[in-house]
Image: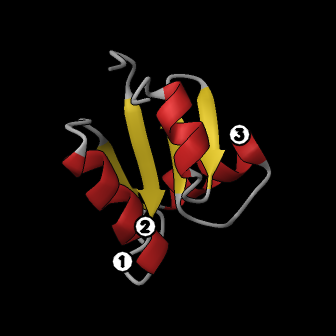
Amino acid sequence: MTDKKVTVFSTPTCSWCVRVKDYLKKNGVSFSDLDVSKDYKAAQDMIRKTGQQGVPQIWVGSSAVVGFDKTKLDSILELN
């Protein structure tokens, strides 16, 4: 399991955001959740880093995963 900081950028109405957060919890991964619908600075930071406006975005250390890409998350988080 990674010891890198994990941050999820999400919105309350995004079903994929709920799924990725449930997946992280199920696997014992601690994370910070930033609601970009209410946090303008976080939204701008997310867009600046990835060039993408879509959520969820999961940052593990300096690696960004756009969308719920389970294979990529498992690899970065060393869950496989």
Q: Mark 2 highlights which residue? A: 17
Dot 3 lies on which element?
Answer: helix
From the top left corner, tell me how far across and down residue 22 is, in percent. 27, 60
Q: Earlier in the sequence, mark 1 or mark 2?
A: 1
Q: Is 42 on the left or on the right of 64, as rendered?
A: left
Q: Is 5 on the left or on the right of 74, as rendered?
A: left
**CB under 8 Å between callouts 1 and 2?**
yes
Of 51 and 59, nearer the camera is 59
Of 16 and 54, nearer the camera is 16
Q: Mark 3 highlights which residue? A: 49
- In the image, what residue type sits under mark 3? Lys
Separation of marks 2 and 3 at Cα, in angstroms: 19 Å
Asked if one can make out residue 70 in the rendered structure from this viewpoint, the answer is yes
Residue 12: which disc? 1
**CB under 8 Å between callouts 1 and 3?**
no
Which corner quadrant holds the C terminus? top left
Dot 2 lies on which element?
Answer: helix
At 37% from the left and 67% from the top, the residue drawn is 19
